[in-house]
Image: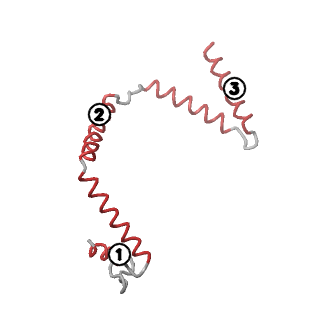
Amino acid sequence: MRSAFEAWAQRDGHIVRRREDKPDEYLVFETQRRWVIWQAALAHGKSAAASSKYQAQKAAAKEAAAREAAILAAAAVPQIDADEATVRNRVLNEVLDAFSDLDDASGIEGVLKVIQSLKKKNKALAES
């Protein structure tokens, strides 16, 4: 385990020289810190993989993902016909044109005026 860490640390540019008075510690603090993190990560991985709770959670997650995929497949996006697409594009273009006429200084009042004018135009079209 230590040799794998030292190979990784050297490739990453760390000094892997150990202390003479304590051969289990590294001379450079940053290398020692990474060694402790390396050990903790390996210990955590072993304990998690060994626990049956971890295996149960993993199986439950796979089952939940399969259920969600089935739900998404069942609720496919409905297709819109050409007439509806044309109406949507026309409305979008009208809204974009209305807001493009605003200047930067108009602020929220200008936005409210545009919304009111679009409502009036829509009401007039509905009445006729």
Whole-percent x, y for residue 127 in the image: 63, 12
Question: Do the numbered discs 3 and 1 sit on residues whose CB atoms are within 8 Å?
Answer: no
Amino acid type shown at disc 2: Arg
Answer with mark 3 or mark 1, whichever residue precedes in sequence.
Answer: 1
Distance from label 3 to label 2 (Cα)?
A: 45 Å
Amino acid type indicated by mark 1: Ala
What kind of residue is marked 3? Gln
Q: Which residue, given by chain and number where applicable, does mark 1 sit on?
A: 9
Foreground tag (3 vs 2):
2
Circle 3 residues within 10 Å: few <14, some 14–19, many ≥20: few
Give the percent coordinates (x, y) of residue 92: 56, 32
Residue 11 in the image, given as x and y percentages of width and height = 34, 76
Residue at mark 1 to residue at mark 2: CA–CA distance: 43 Å
The secondary structure type at the circle numbered 1 is: helix
Disc sitting over residue 67 in the figure? 2
Q: Residue at x 27, y 41 (%)?
A: 62
Question: For this rendering, which residue is in front, 64 or 126?
Answer: 64
Earlier residue among tags 3 and 2: 2
Q: Mark 3 highlights which residue?
A: 116
- Rendered view: 27 above or below 5: below
The mark lying in front, picked from 1 and 2, is 1
Give the percent coordinates (x, y) of residue 6. 31, 76
In the figure, is residue 92 to the left or right of 27? right
Which quarter shows the N terminus?
bottom left
Secondary structure of the residue carrying tag 2 is: helix
Element under disc 3: helix
- In the displayed structure, 3 sits above or below 64; it is below
Between discs 1 and 2, the one toward the N terminus: 1
Quarter of the figure with residue 66: top left
Residue in view at x 72 percent, y 36 percent: 108
Instruction: Kindly indicate the quadrant of the structure image that contains residue 35.
Output: bottom left
Q: Is residue 9 left or right of residue 109?
A: left
